[in-house]
Image: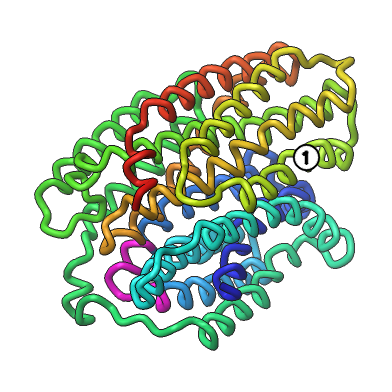
Amino acid sequence: MVPLCAGAVLNPVNSTVIATALSPIGGDLGVGPSATAWLVAVMYLASAIGQPVAGRLADQFGPRRVFLAGGMLVAVAGVLGALAPDFSWLLASRALVGLGTGAAFPAAIAMLREQAGRLGVPTPPRTLALLSTVSLVTLTVGPPLGGVLVDTIGWRAVFAVNVPLGLAVTALGFLLLPRSLPRHREARAWRLLDLPGTALFGGAVSLFLLTTMKLPRPPAAVLLGLVGCLLLLVLVEVRVRTPFIDLRMLGTNAALVTAYARVFLTFLVVYGVLFGLTPWLQDSRGLSASAAGLVLLGMSAVGAVAAFVGVRGRRLLPPLMVGALGLLAGSAGMLVLDADSSIALLVLVCAAFGLPNGLGLVANQLLVYRAAPADHVGAAAGLFRTAQYTGAMTATGVAALAYADGVSGDGLHFLGWVSVGAGALLLLLTVGDRGLRRFAEV
C-alpha cells in the first residue's frame, strides 16, 4: 500500500499545485488568463482519456508495469516543464502529467484485485478508502505547496517537483509491488488493444471539453463532431472482439453505469463549488485568497474523514444516502448565502459538501470494484475517474455560464439551483439502484 498511496498523491497534487503559479506564468510568458486556464483544462482532459487507457493496459500487460511507467512519465513531464522555453512546452508537460498520474489509480485498483485473488480474500473496504483519503488530503496540500514553491524558487518549481515525486513513486513500486503476470503474451496483448476505439473515445472527450468551455452556445461544428464521435465509437465498439469500452458488458451491468452517473453528478457539484464558490468568496464576500482557502478546507477535511471512517462492512446504501443528503443540504445552503453571510455559515455549507465528496467517492469506487468483471477491473476503474473528470469539465462550463456577466450573488444562486437539481437526481439514482443491495453481498 505504500507505493500505491504514493502514486495516489500524484494526480490530486498536480491538479491543485498549479493554481498559485498561473498568474506568474502568464506574466513571464506574456499570455493571458484564458490561455493559462488551459494548463488546468489540459490535465483534466489527459486524465479523463488516459485513465481508462491505463486501466485497459493494466488488464492486458499487468498493473505493475503500468504503474511504473506512469511514475516515469511524471518525472519526464517534470523535466519538460522545468526547462520549457515557451508556453506550448508547458501545455505538453501538463498533458504528460495527466497521462502519467492517471495511470496510478486504475493500476492500483487492478493490483488490489489481483492480490486479493492470490490470497483468496476480499479486498477490505478500508484499503480502498485509504487510497481515496490520501487523494482528498493531498487536494488541500496542493495550493499551499504551490504558493511556497512559487514564492521561494519560482513557478518552474511547480513543474520540477514532479521529478523527485515521479522517481520516488517508481522506485517504491519497483521495490515493493509484487510482480504481476500479463494475461496474454506481449505480441498478442498489443493486438488485443482497440486503437480505433481508443482514438474515438479520446476525440469524444476532447470535444466534450470544448463544448463545456463554450456554454451556453457551443459551436455547431463542435456539437456535430461530438455526436459523430459518439456514434462512431458505438459502431466500432460493438463490432470488435476486444473493445476499449465493452458496451455489451456495460449494457448488462446497470450497477456500473449507475455508479458512473452518481460520480458524474457528485463531482459536477463538488467541482462547481470549488470553481464557483471560491471567486464569490473573494469578489463578493470580500475574503482574501488565503481566507477563502481556509473556508473551503472544511470540505476537504470532512471528505477525508468521511472517506476513511464512513464506509464500513459491505453495506453501501447508507453512506451513499448520507452523501446524497449532504450534497442536497449544501446546495440548499448556497441558495441562502449573500455578501453578509457569517463565516460560520460559509464553513458549514462547505463542510456539507465534504460528505458526498468522501462517502460518494469511496462507496461508488467500492461498487465498481465489486461489479466489474475480473478481467475488466482496470478499465472499469479508469472509466470511474473519467466520470469524475467529465463532471469537473462540466462544472467549469456551468461556473463560467453563471458568472458570464461577472461574479455575483445571482450567479452563485444559479449554481445553487443547478446543484439542487443534481442532488435530487443523485438521490433518485441511489434509492432506486438495486445493484447496491446485490453487490453488498459480494
Question: Compared with residue 174, is residue 357 higher up or lower down, i.e. above or below?
Answer: above
- Res. 209 visible in picture: yes
- The N terminus, quarter of image: bottom right
- Res. 26 visible in picture: no
Looking at the image, residue 278 sits to the left or right of residue 127; the answer is right
Q: In which quadrant of the rendered view does residue 329 lie? A: top right
- First to last magenta residue range: 55-65
Looking at the image, residue 369 sits to the left or right of residue 134; the answer is left
The residue sitting at the bottom extreme is 175
Q: Position of residue 256 (x, y in %)?
A: 33, 43
For the residue labelled by badge 1, is the local secondary structure a helix, a strand or a loop? helix
Residue 116 magenta-highlighted:
no
Residue plotted at (89% across, 21% down): 342
Disc 1 crowd, CA 10 A, few/some/many (<14, 14-19, 20+): many
Residue plotted at (83% across, 55% down): 147
Query: What secondary structure is the magenta-colored segment mainly?
Result: helix
Question: Compared with residue 303, is residue 163 higher up or lower down, i.e. above or below?
Answer: below
Instruction: Give the camera-side residue of 26 and 288.
Output: 288
Q: Which residue is mark 1?
A: 298
Residue 64 magenta-highlighted:
yes
Q: In which quadrant of the rendered view does residue 34 lie? A: top right
The tally of labels here is: 1
Q: Position of residue 206 (x, y in %)?
A: 41, 43
Looking at the image, residue 325 sits to the left or right of residue 259; the answer is right
Residue plotted at (59% across, 67% down): 5
Instruction: Give the camera-side residue of 98 and 241.
Output: 241
Instruction: Give the camera-side residue of 261 and 129.
Output: 129
Q: Position of residue 136 (x, y in %)?
A: 65, 51
Instruction: Give the camera-side residue of 266 and 95.
Output: 266
Q: Position of residue 357 (x, y in %)?
A: 61, 40
Residue plotted at (54% across, 39% down): 319
Tag 1: residue type? Gly
